[in-house]
Amino acid sequence: MRNTLKYIFSVLLLFPVAAFCQPAELSRGLRIGFDLSSAAISAIEGEGVEAGFTADMNFKESYFAVADLGYVNRVKKGPGYEISQDALYFRAGADYNFYERDNDVIAFGLRYGLSTFRHKGDKVVVENPLWGNYTGEMSGNNLGAQWIEAVFSLKTELSGNIFLGWSLRGKVMLSSKSDENMEEWHIPGYGMSGNPSTLGVNFYIFYRIPF
Amino acid sequence: MIVLLALFSSCENECFHKPLSMLNADFFTIDEGEEGEVTVDDVSVFAIGREDTLLYDSASVRRISMPLDPNSDITAFVLLFGDIADTLTFHHTAAPYFYSYECGFVLHFDVSSFEHTTNIIDSLKLERPEITHKYEKHLKIYL
């Protein structure tokens, strides 16, 4: 795992730089990506399902329109509780590619991010030495957050239309709606809640459907 | 990468202190229009329904803390001043509050109304009807 990622990382960093200089030729296509990092994290944590997808398409010479969609379903168990979170997040924005060799992309971009989620206490047990245990549930609340991101990203074509890439995101919260009875530990798509800004890294594998 | 994964993975810590939400009441007297906190001697307190457990046993107290029944919407306490008794009855609702990952949920109460007898107690003043896990002053008992 570690070596593979290290390899991917080095390849991604070096490959475009080592590439031959060829005249830029705009090849259009819709690139669909799967977020390997969030899938890996949810597999390691074993607390639920997390899946993230991204799509981009160049609409002008060096500009790409980008949209991401993610789904999160987490269950967390602890002493006397079981809580769950169900979420969708969405990002939209544009990238400017300042590296125009082959089909590789090194880009800066901006995104608007939106997350809508619901959490609840599926099992709540509170011990009371005088009155005995309280057993109940905590009903769900519809919550949400909005943020903006500055994104640095890199994509490199491994072989015909298959790309690997990563993106580094700096995120700034615009607004959020939280539950006063249960603080959200993690805002899907954004990161740790309670922080006015967060950093995120995503690794992707892409397939480009050429036109 | 290992560091990143470590950041994302949850930390399993123990619960060192899980607070219990209690209704805190302080004793006051009014002397020539001036109210003052007092220490009361020989106070015993128990809850109706749990007469077997004395919350205070002939104690000398400035403040008493009373645990409300989370499985009911009414809790009554008997306060014995020597051998004279007064009963305090509270009507309330309970709602879970997520305290921490280590400790889980606690309960918060909202006291909607109260009644009391007037053998020793003159009156009550509910200053803060929200009973949370924080140690706050909720009720003034005037003797």
Image (tube, coloured by chain):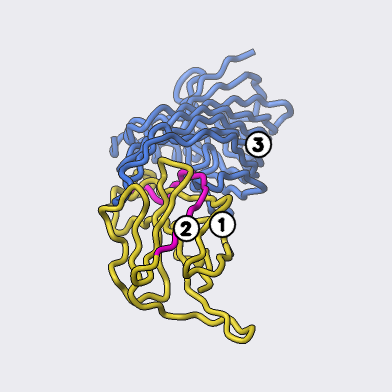
Q: Nearer the viewer, mark 3 or mark 2?
A: 2
Chain A appears what colour? blue
* Residue named by callout 3: A95
Q: Residue at x 34, y 30 (%)?
A: A43
Q: Residue at x 57, y 27 (%)?
A: A69
* Secondary structure beneath label 2: strand
Chain B appears what colour? yellow
* Secondary structure beneath label 3: strand
Q: Residues within 10 Å of mark 3 (few under 14, many from 20)?
A: many
* Residue named by callout 2: B88
**Image location (x, y in percent) of residue A33:** 52, 25
Say which amino acid is labelled 3. Asp
Contact (Cβ within 8 Å) of mark 2 with mark 1:
no
Query: What is the quadrant of residue A125 in the picture?
Result: top left
Magenta-colored span: B85-102
Chain letter belonging to callout 1 = B
Disc 3 and disc 1 on one polypeptide chain? no
* Residue named by callout 1: B129
**Image location (x, y in percent) of residue B124:** 55, 65
Chain letter belonging to callout 2 = B
Q: CA distance from mark 2 to mark 1?
A: 15 Å
Say which amino acid is labelled 1. Pro
- Could you tell me if residue A20 is visible in this image? no
Tell me the chief SS of the magenta region.
strand
Say which amino acid is labelled 2. Leu
